[in-house]
Image (cartoon, helix red, strand yellow):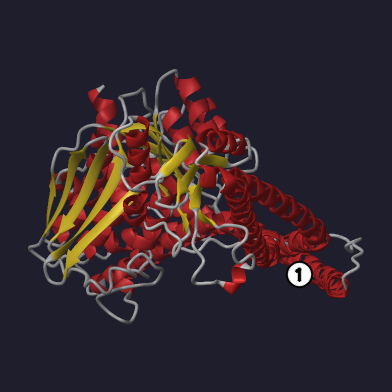
Amino acid sequence: MIKSLSIRQNMALLTLMPLLLLAMLLEGSLLQGRYADLEQGLLDRGWLMARQLAASSEYGVFANNRDFLNNLALNALNQADLRAVTILDANDQVLTQAGEFSLSALQAHQHGAQSASQLTRVSQMLKTEGLDEHSPLRSDAQTLWIYQPILPTQVALDELAGDAAQKRTGAVIVEISKTRMQQQKSRVLWISLAVTALCLSLASYVVWLASRQIILPIRQLSHAVQNVAQGRLQPSLLLVSKITELSGLVSGMNDMMAMLQKDRAAMQAQIDAATLALREKKEQAEHATQQKSMFLAVASHDLRQPLHALGLYAAELRRQLAGAAEQPLVERIEQSVDALATLLNALLDISKLDAGAVTANMQSCPLTPIVNRVANDYRMLAQMKNIRLVVHPCTGWVYSDPVLLERILMNLVSNALRYTPENGCVMIACRKRGNQLRIEVRDNGVGISLADQAHIFAEFVQVEKVQLDSSKGLGLGLAIVDRLVRLLGHGIEVRSMPQRGSLFALQLPRAEAAARLSITGAYPALSASHVLENLPLRGKKLLVVDDDELVLTSTATILASWGGEVAQACDLQSVRALLENGAAWDLIISDYQLSATETGMDVIAAIRAHAQQEVKGILISGDTSPELLQRASSAGLHLMHKPVKPAKLRSLSLFLLNESNDS
């Protein structure tokens, strides 16, 4: 990956690289010329010294005056760069030598001459080294050798004439050292490099100063662009540049930011207006929600009241018309009342959940009583449909809201029974999975296709039929389950295959055993003999308290039809009047909300205080909130929600009366 360069680096590269190349070319050219001058100067000095020695030694060679020649050679060594001197006679024999020659053959000849042994002719040495009058110059990296013949002065003074008949009288060989020249070359090189470096440094500084005039404005523009990209619009850039293009860019940037600020202000005004409109709509929605909650509170009581009375009257009508021709018509009326009660409860529950009127009371609760109550509630329905309801032991404690958890299981079991054919089976089982406990509701009913499983938790969805079936509800049971599961923070799993059945599994966190309140609203199932008995309440004294005349009359009528001795009261004052007359009852059935200041709990508490014993009591209310259930449980009362099915009212009454007899 190629690393990107900054503007300053690019400017330096584009500016200094040509300067560096030009400096290298100039420096090379100058050094080459300077080196050539030094070499030529050394050569000229060498020739000059050789010629001076040749001219000075002409007489000594002619007279064979070796002392003179030796002194001449030694004096010549005082010249700079002169390393060795050899003077030869006409026969190329060494007459004298001063210094040390680096030529190997000449050194051998010198050694022979000093030892006074048989002399080697210099011509052989010159032939070996290739240095003679035909090749008077030889050089290497460190040394320069010059061969200068000694010619008599009276013969051919003009060297350029080149008289062939001219005969030399001897020769001078000098060895010139190049060491000092090499040092001068090195000194010239370092000086040249230092000057070049200084020039490049000055050029770099000039480039830096020039780039600074460009980089600083561009950097500020870059920061301004980044701020704009991040939504931070700053005021106009106070930047003055002498570069025309940069000045234009700064001006354009200021114009752009001014336009963006204007657009932002306009957009912010639109956002504020939209926010205000949304706030107004939100307030309207919250007001509508409050109105809806108020409607639910009223509907939960006012709609359940006549439906509750209708159910009781239908049950009494069925008893009175037992065996008559109108019996099937009464059964149809009871079925319609049950369907209407189921739909009303589902719609009100969905509305409360959507309005956030239901809150979870999380606590440690045991599974065994919850599962048993659910099974007992639906065991009679399973028997009527000839469906086997199997419950595997569910032990252990979970962290949940026991009331809402029981409601979830009731909906799941009810849904399983609804879609399981005759001779089928519905099973409730529990399994431990690490730190969680899994409650499974299985059936071998019609099942759910994979495509429909994604929609079963939506409202008004029935997977078996396209049209809503009143006998199977509005398709709200699983929608309530989904909302309650999300409210409690639990998980739910669905596995199903068409014609193979379905499995709904709740996943709950396990908890340690803790003190708990008994949950009311469910009770053990009674045997068939109790259910089918014509006068199950014979000899029992019961009190019915309700502020609604219709509900009061219908409840008292059906209780009396079951053989009970029923007293009626509409408020606490009426109850106290009956107590003052010496009345006593085995069971009290009271509406919860009697007036703005009186409740059924107040009535039962007054009766218990007067009787000085725990008289059994049943509260009936259209309020399905968990808080009311907890208050009833704390008072040792059982709570039933309107509309109450006569069979459940009879079963709970018999259970409580039998419990009183046992105690």
| Nearer the observer, 222 or 27 | 27
Determine if residue 110 is in view.
yes
| Nearer the observer, 402 or 46 | 46
- Across and down, in percent, residue 584 comes to 42, 28
Residue appearing at x 59%, y 63% in the figure: 155
**For this view, does 312 lie left or right of residue 552?**
left
Task: Give the answer, above or below, for where 116 lies relative to 663.
Answer: below
Say what amino acid the circle numbered 1 marks.
Ala
**For this view, does 140 lie left or right of residue 49?**
left
Image quadrant occupied by the C terminus: top left
**For this view, does 369 lie left or right of residue 163?**
left
| Nearer the observer, 337 or 102 | 102
Task: Give the answer, above or below, for where 304 lies relative to 405.
Answer: below
Number of residue marks: 1
Residue appearing at x 76%, y 57% in the figure: 203
Residue appearing at x 34%, y 23% in the figure: 514
| Nearer the observer, 494 or 119 | 119
Q: Give neighbour class at mark 1: few <14, some 14-19, many 20+ (Cα, 10 Å).
A: few
Q: Residue furthest top?
A: 612
Residue 326 occupies quadrant:
bottom left
**For this view, does 622 lie left or right of residue 472?**
right
Task: Give the answer, above or below, for where 120 lies relative to 237.
Answer: above
Determine if residue 176 is in view.
no
- Across and down, in percent, residue 330 comes to 30, 69
Residue appearing at x 63%, y 56% in the figure: 44
| Residue at the spot of label 1 | 274
Q: Secondary structure at mark 1?
A: helix
Q: Residue furthest left?
A: 423
